[in-house]
Image (spheres, coloured by chain):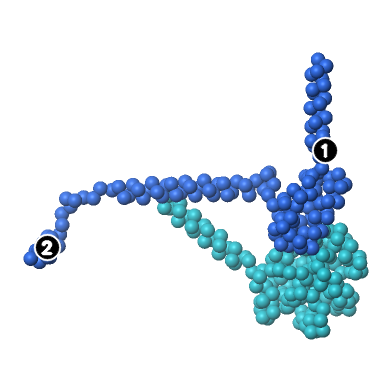
Amino acid sequence: MAQGVAIGLVALLFILLAWSLLHDEGGDLSKKANAGELPSAPDFTLERLDQDGTIQLSSLRGKAVVLNVWASWCIPCKDEAPYLEQVWRANRDRGVVVVGLDAKDFRADARRFANRFALTFPLAYDGPGDAIGRYGVTGFPETFVIDREGRVVRAFAGAVNGKPERGQLRSAIEDALS
Amino acid sequence: MRVALLAVLGALVAAGTATAAPPNAADLEAEIVCPVCETTLDQSNAPIAQRMKTFIRVRIAAGDSEGEIKDALVAEFGSEVLAEPPGGGFGLLAWLLPLTALVGGAVVVGLLIRSWSRRRGVPVDDDADLDPQLERLVDEELARFDG
């Protein structure tokens, strides 16, 4: 009887371990995307910061999405924000949506940041960081380019600021649109 | 009668003063977790931790209670921001699960020890018949050993 309980407990632990390993693909998402494997972008529904209501990533299927993870306290995010606004303005009519995903931040600080940089693209709020955890985000900023079918075509760790990174972002957007 | 009234008034004033005492920033910083570095605020110098410390001080100065400040932080960062899970609702599970696992583990270990000690106590049947061929082989080996 006791042996049965012990074996049951061990089996349960193994099942939990296997489940957590299978569902914890966040860390591999960037690697897979940059290796050309086109992993599915984890869906989320989050509160919007720029207006009332929520934003659901899967509702943007059919468009290319540039998902930028940022926070108001992140210094490289400040350098990157004006460029992302440019990308949004230049490509919005081509079926590209830039989504700013503010995480681990105060809402009020995030809104001040958005006003300061005159950001007009949709802004989602992930205060606890649950959604960015599923993307395996470990630092700020990070950017994911998602194609029309909801697959990640490219991930950028750090600010997309230098000439090479900007070229790679433009190229990833074209891939996502094709 | 007057003495009793004065005592009641005194107790009420004391209780009022006790609830009106402002929360201590250092205590709160030890009870709130930085969402980026996942240590308590008093152990962290991360930008968001600094910002949260400022938030706590501003709210204390505004007269908020400890509970109100914690609620405001939970509304921004989720319940993970509390170093200790709340004592009610889902947070109660965080307290109960380890206790249940500990008691459950102790029961399983106890049952295993009981079962093993019983098995070890099973008497050996010394009189069981030995296979005649095997018995002969043992006798031969013993004789050779003695010789």
Identify which residue is drawn at 59% across, 67% down: A22
Q: Chain of mark 2?
A: B
Q: Is residue A109 above or below residue B120?
A: below
Q: Is residue A119 above or below residue A108?
A: below
Q: Which residue is mark 1?
A: B20
The answer to whether tags 1 and 2 share a subunit is yes
Chain for colour cyan = A
Q: Which residue is mark 2?
A: B142
Residue B85 % position (x, y)? 68, 49
The answer to which quarter of the image holds residue A162 is bottom right
Identify which residue is drawn at 74% across, 55% down: B42
Closest to the observer, A171 or B19:
B19
Q: Chain of mark 1?
A: B
Residue B106 % position (x, y)? 48, 47
Chain for colour blue = B
Circle count? 2
Going by the numbered disc 1, the residue's amino acid type is: Ala
Identify which residue is drawn at 80% across, 56% down: B52
